[in-house]
Image (tube, rainbow, N blue to C red):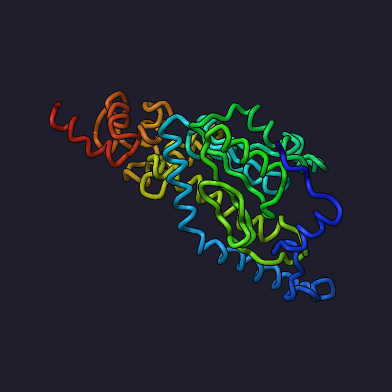
């Protein structure tokens, strides 16, 4: 049974205990400070948010390993959040296909209030655990998937309900919150808890909490994609050439990785049907597109393995 949402004095007492809901003594005078001082205060608080992520890196690493294992087993990653947290999850999910060439269903964002909540606050959508549970069911989450709850406060009912439902299904669960680990009591596989401290403007978790959350999600998705072979050296090689900027970026990557000129890079990409990774292996291993694709498949998607394809070189 979902836990009834706290209201009135009970909710007040919950919020009062949260670090992200406390007043920040360093910004008491921000409303009367000169503009230069306002910006300096905000900048210094943002730096604290970045530093708060550092002690959480071991937990991010554990989360990456869980997501990588799920992807290799045919599972997916679902971010679940409300408000700013939900929007950050949807943003990270939406950027994976063009950046890493992944299918849209591999990483998905669920936000309280649905699509409309991306652009306009849907008041009350986050207040019921059953809404989160229903969203997980509607998305078709299975035991092969990973559900990552995102809530600066750690208490958002929609997120708590979604994570609880995911565990019932048998999915692996992660949670990103910006309150101290010592206060985290939810049952999940990995919690990531950058303790950003009180916000510059009390309770405005779109600020430091949003910054720290964005950093964590960036690392979670990017590190996983690196582990799956979607980066060569420090360049994205499974990006999709969906606009002119990405077409030219693809040529630049091929040129930087192989040393060829602009026209040769364009020719290789044409022969590779626009796939940067295939073009790289064609040029670096001196093979045609079909052989390059075979090498990439044998190499598990990694350019380095495809180039050093011993089976191909031995004629096996």
Asked if residue 36 shows in the view, the reply is no
| In the foreground, 59 or 37 | 59
**For residue 63, above or below residue 272:** below
Picture quarter containing residue 122? top right
Rendering coords of residue 80 (x, y %): 64, 41
In the image, farthest residue toward the left: 314
Where residue 169 sits: x, y (%)? 56, 32
Q: In x, y percent, where is residue 188?
A: 55, 46
Q: Is residue 41 left or right of residue 6?
A: left
* Residue occupying image coordinates x 32% and y 34%: 300
In the rendered image, residue 151, in percent from the top left (x then y), is placed at: 66, 50
Name above or below for residue 95 compared with residue 193.
above
In what quadrant of the picture does the N terminus appear?
top right
For the view shown, which residue lies furthest in the front direction? 1
Quarter of the image with the C terminus is: top left
From the viewer's perspective, is 267 left or right of 283? right
Q: Going 46% across and 47% down the picture, which residue do you hit?
A: 64
Query: Residue at (37%, 43%) from the top-left corner?
Result: 255
Q: Which one is nearer the viewer's eye here, 272 or 213? A: 213
Farthest residue toward the top? 290
Q: Quadrant of residue 91?
A: top right
In the foreground, 298 or 173 = 173
Q: Quadrant of residue 282?
A: top left
Kindly tell me whether residue 173 is visible in this rendering. Answer: yes
Extreme residue toward the right, this view: 8
Nearer to the camera, 168 or 244 = 168
């Amino acid at each position: 049974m979902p836990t009834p949402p706290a209201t009135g004095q009970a909710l007040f007492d919950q919020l009062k205990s949260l670090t992200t809901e406390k007043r920040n003594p360093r910004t008491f005078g921000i409303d009367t400070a000169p503009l230069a001082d306002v910006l300096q205060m905000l900048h210094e608080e943002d730096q604290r948010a970045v530093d708060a992520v550092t002690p959480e890196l071991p937990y991010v690493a554990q989360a990456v390993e869980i997501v990588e294992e799920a992807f290799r087993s045919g599972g997916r990653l679902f971010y679940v959040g409300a408000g700013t947290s939900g929007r950050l999850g949807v943003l990270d999910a939406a950027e994976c296909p063009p950046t890493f060439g992944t299918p849209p269903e591999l990483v998905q964002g669920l936000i309280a209030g649905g699509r409309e909540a991306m652009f306009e606050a849907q008041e009350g959508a986050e207040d019921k655990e059953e809404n989160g549970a229903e969203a997980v069911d509607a998305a078709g989450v299975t035991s092969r998937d990973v559900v990552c709850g995102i809530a600066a406060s750690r208490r958002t009912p929609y997120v708590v309900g979604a994570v609880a439902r995911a565990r019932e299904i048998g999915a692996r669960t992660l949670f990103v919150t910006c309150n101290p680990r010592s206060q985290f009591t939810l049952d999940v596989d990995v919690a990531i808890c950058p303790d950003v401290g009180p916000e510059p403007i009390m309770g405005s978790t779109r600020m430091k909490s949003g910054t720290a959350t964005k950093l964590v999600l960036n690392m979670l998705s990017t590190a996983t994609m690196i582990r799956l072979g979607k980066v060569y050296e420090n360049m994205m090689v499974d990006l999709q050439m969906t606009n002119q900027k990405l077409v030219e970026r693809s040529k630049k990557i091929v040129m930087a990785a192989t040393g060829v000129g602009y026209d040769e890079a364009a020719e290789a990409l044409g022969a590779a049907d626009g796939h940067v990774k295939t073009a790289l292996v064609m040029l670096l291993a001196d093979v045609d597109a079909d052989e390059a694709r075979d090498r990439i498949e044998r190499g598990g998607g990694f350019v380095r393995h495809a180039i050093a394809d011993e089976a191909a070189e031995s004629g096996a």
